[in-house]
Structures are given as C-alpha cells and as structure tokens.
C-alpha cells in the first residue's frame, strides 16, 4: 500500500520540478530578451525639467536597447497623475516614471494620493540633481549667507521669500534654508519659478532658493545676487560657494529618478538601471547637463529605494513646519 502511494507522489514531484524548471527558463529568457518592444517613460508636462532630462536620455537608451523609447507627458495634480498611471501599469519594465523632487514632496503633503509612494513602486535609478542658488536682490545690501541670516534675525518682522507655489520644490528649499539659518520668514507663492525670480530681482521679496539654470541670466546681468549654490560649486559661477561650505546645517533632499511599478522582476530592474547609468556616464550628455546646471548621479535600484524613503521623510518634516500636510 505504501508503494502504491509513493509512486504517484514521486511522479507528481517530478512533474512539479519539470514545470518549475520550464517556468524559470521562460522567465530568464524573457528577462534576457528585455526589452523586446518599445519602453514608455511617463512624466509630467512637455518642457518641464523632467521632460527635458528624459528626452536627453532616450536616443542613447534606444541605441542600447535597440528598441524605441517614447515619452508620454501626463501633466496634472503636481505629478500625481503621471505617478498614478505608472503605479497601475503592468510590472514588466515597459512603463516607468521619470520623477523630480515633486514626487517626494507630494507624498509628504498629501495623505490621500491614489497610490502608495513606497509600496506601489520599485526603484530603478537616480538620475541626478537640479542645481539651486540662494538668491537675493542686490538692493538688499547683503553679500553672503551669513549677512542674510543676520539681516533676517535683526528684522522687526519676518522677511519674505518667493516660490513657484505652495509645496513646490522652491518652497521646500526655502523652508530648509530658513530652518538651517534659524530665522523667521513669510512665504509668498507665485505660479512659476520665473515669477518668483522676478520678485527677487524687483526687491519685493528678500530671498529665494531658485533653480540655477533659469536664474543664471539674471545672475550674470547683476539683477539678482547668488550667495551660495546647492549642493556643490557650479562652473557657471565658480566664485560662489557651495551652501555646505557656509551653512552645513542645510539639508538638501529630492532628486530626479526613475521608478517602475512594484512587482517588476529584479533582473529587469537591474538591466534598466545599468542602461540608464551607462547613458548618464556619457561625455556627450555630461556636457549637455552641465549647460543646464544639472548634475547627473546614477544609483542602483536598491540605493534609489532608500533615497526615495529618505527624501519623503525629510519632506514630511518640512511640510509639517510649513503647515502644508493635508
């Protein structure tokens, strides 16, 4: 009786082993052939920094993968629409999200997003950072970060700072700077970084931590004064110190990067990450990134998972300080 039972169990185990082996071989073959069709990069509006960076990457990505790489622009809801599309996509490596620091900021501010910013995504790679500059109007009469902090602390009422909107990257950077400097300041929101820059130039606000690329013409023309650059010195204004040199307490957070839907095979994530990092290391792109004051900095999928978590934690603290947590 025992023999009659043992034989079928042995045959069943053999069938299971054969099936498992075939399944593993099929998965390995699929991953080895990745990608076998076009890859879609979902990001926010056309002309945004995310969009510009993504479009710089796709020619070389297409050459490496021998497949078309297409950009799908989905503006709206502070980047949440684009993120939601990717969170719901099939986790096969053919739909990914190109994000900026707005992804982590949105996660810190909004408690009821249509996706979980941690559980619904898997890291692919960090792409890099947009260089920022602490700027003031020349009419303010300050020449350094220390001067600005001293001026702010001595002012009878909080000084003003401009941003591209409540909860924007500029707003969060301003709050980080204010906290690191230990002074009071009142936020004035505008619709864009361009408008925030104009307010600094006009002297209607006392400071703003602006993207260096768009504000560089104002700096070169002397219409605004750059006191420091986050996080490292820029070749465009080499005499301006890095903010870590003059205000070590300043905590930079947020970066550009690529996320895939959770459940994407680890081998595919690693292949994708390697391709992105290869492109980021190309001399041609480094020159183009330098021209737009963008610092490329790749990472492994595991490293980017940790970076996203850390960025969200940092922005949660900033959002609470600024009273933006919803």
Image (cartoon, rainbow, N blue to C red):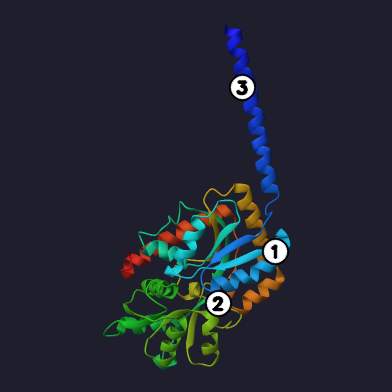
What residue is shown at x 47% (from left), y 84% (from top)? 194
Q: Is residue 135 above or below residue 91?
A: below
Give the residue at mark 3.
Answer: 12
What residue is shown at x 63% (from left), y 57% (from top)? 273
- Left or right: where 42 falls relative to 144: right
Secondary structure beneath label 1: helix
The quarter of the rendered structure image containing the N terminus is top right
Q: Of label 3 and label 2, which has the lower sequence position?
A: 3
- CB under 8 Å between discs 1 and 2: no
Q: Is residue 253 visible?
A: no
Q: Which mark is residue 288?
A: none
Closest to the camera, between mark 3 and mark 2, is 3
- Left or right: where 229 falls relative to 105: right
Give the residue at mark 2.
Answer: 47
Secondary structure beneath label 3: helix
- Left or right: where 309 falls relative to 35: left
Asked where in the image residue 289 lies, by quadrant, the reply is bottom right
The quarter of the rendered structure image containing the C terminus is bottom left
Q: Is residue 196 above or below residue 178?
A: below
Give the residue at mark 1.
Answer: 62
């Amino acid at each position: 009786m025992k023999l009659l039972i043992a034989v079928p169990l042995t045959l069943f185990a053999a069938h299971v082993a054969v099936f498992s082996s075939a399944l593993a071989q099929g998965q390995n073959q699929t991953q080895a052939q990745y990608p076998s069709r076009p890859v879609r990069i979902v990001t926010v509006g056309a002309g945004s920094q995310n969009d510009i960076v993504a479009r710089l990457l796709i020619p070389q990505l297409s050459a490496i993968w021998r497949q078309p790489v297409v950009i799908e622009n989905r503006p709206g809801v502070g980047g949440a629409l684009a993120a939601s599309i990717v969170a719901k996509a099939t986790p096969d490596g053919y739909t990914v999200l190109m994000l900026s620091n707005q992804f982590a900021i949105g996660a810190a501010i909004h408690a009821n997003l249509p996706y979980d910013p941690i559980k619904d995504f898997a890291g692919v790679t960090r792409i890099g950072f947009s260089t920022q500059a602490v700027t003031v109007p020349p009419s303010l009469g300050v020449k350094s970060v220390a001067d600005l902090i001293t001026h702010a602390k001595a002012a009878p009422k909080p000084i003003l700072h401009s941003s591209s909107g409540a909860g924007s990257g500029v707003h969060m950077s301003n709050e980080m700077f204010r906290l690191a400097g230990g002074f009071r300041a009142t936020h004035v929101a505008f619709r864009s970084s361009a408008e925030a820059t104009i307010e600094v130039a006009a002297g209607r606000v006392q400071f703003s931590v602006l993207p260096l690329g768009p504000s560089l013409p104002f700096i070169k023309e002397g219409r605004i004064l750059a006191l420091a650059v986050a996080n490292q010195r820029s070749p465009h204004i080499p005499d301006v110190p890095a903010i870590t040199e003059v205000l070590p307490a300043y905590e930079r957070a947020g970066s550009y990067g690529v996320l895939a839907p959770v459940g994407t095979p680890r081998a595919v994530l690693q292949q994708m990450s390697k391709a992105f990092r290869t492109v980021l290391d190309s001399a041609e792109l480094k020159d183009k990134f330098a021209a737009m004051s963008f610092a490329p900095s790749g990472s492994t999928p595991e490293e980017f998972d940790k970076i996203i978590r850390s960025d969200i934690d940092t922005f949660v603290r900033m959002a609470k300080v600024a009273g933006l947590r919803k």
